[in-house]
Amino acid sequence: MPTATAMLEPPPESCPGTGTEQSGKADACAGCPNQAVCAAAGPALPDPDVALIAERLAGVKHKILVLSGKGGVGKSTVTANMARCLAQKEDVSVGVLDIDLCGPSMPRILGCEGEGVHQSGSGWSPIYVEDNLSIMSAGFLLPSPDAAVIWRGPKKNGLIKQLLRDVDWGNLDYLLVDTPPGTSDEHLSIVQYMAGTGIDGAVIVTTPQEISLQDVRKEVNFCRKVDMPVLGIVENMSMFICPKCKVSSTILPATTGGAAKLASDIGVEVVARLPLDPIVGKACDEGGDIFADHADSEVAKAYNGLVRSITAKLA
């Protein structure tokens, strides 16, 4: 595959990509200064680590990516609470892989911030939150919670590959992958590296307002282009529930119909509408468990419904 320095000019927006059978031969390549370079390079060789990752994750029954088009919609919160909800059953083993490299919040949310990663002969050992709930995050590899990850794409992709290839998860029923917002290098890498593992699908998190929904459309298009099923859309912060009177109020107005209208337009199911509840924010800051501490709350019931919907799709 030609390197950036070998190319005569930056690739145009319509570029079919380098290192493929169509590189330099597709209609979009006509007239491009890089056409001869791309055609001569030929298709890229298969990545040998893809097979190693498939072997490493062979003991994981279900792999679910949690995505969001927009940052700040609560994707990591949803991932963590889905994991805790699944792990309520003692005979269900759950893992969480946090590849949001620039904002690895999962250690704080799950109450294991400051833990160190241990290495054994079989690879990196994940951190256990409960006997049946484990987590691996780039946050464990940083010198402090305030340390910034200032990396370009190749170094980010290298760490994602290492987290997939070297972590010894053992046998899991579910592995939830918390991704960064958007459709960038990290998303392409995780899909490519896990190509041989059988990703079950993606859960896409949004909030009700159009500014978030417009990016969900992009996320769904991304999933369809890489042939990854969309298990459903989660509308987070769908309404506010008063902790005193339990009355529900709208905080983020669904000016264009919210997730329900979007789902109808694009043919994807809304699998949950999660309320905005202060107990969730408090639990995330303190590493608490809403299912142990507030099992009868509306938000805990909503998460139980979400998990039922997703597990039914995977059955």
Image: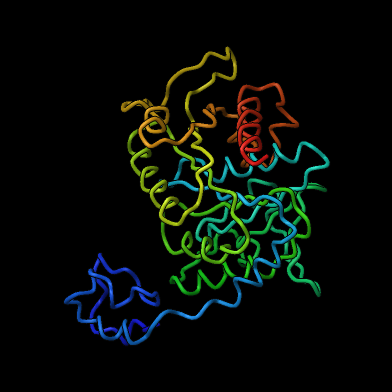
Colour convention: rainbow
- Residue drawn at x 57%, y 12% is 245
Most foreground residue, 124 or 165? 165
In percent of width and height, residue 86 lies at 71, 39
Q: Quadrant of residue 56?
A: bottom right
- Quadrant that contains the N terminus: bottom left
- Quadrant that contains the C terminus: top right
Q: Quadrant of residue 297?
A: top right
- Residue drawn at x 58%, y 62% is 194
In percent of width and height, residue 249 lies at 46, 18
In percent of width and height, residue 13 lies at 25, 65
Most foreground residue, 284 or 156? 156
- Residue drawn at x 58%, y 69% is 161
Most foreground residue, 9 or 101? 9
Above or below: residue 220 compared with residue 248? below
Above or below: residue 70 compared with residue 233? below
Above or below: residue 14 compared with residue 200? below
Total marks shown come to: 0
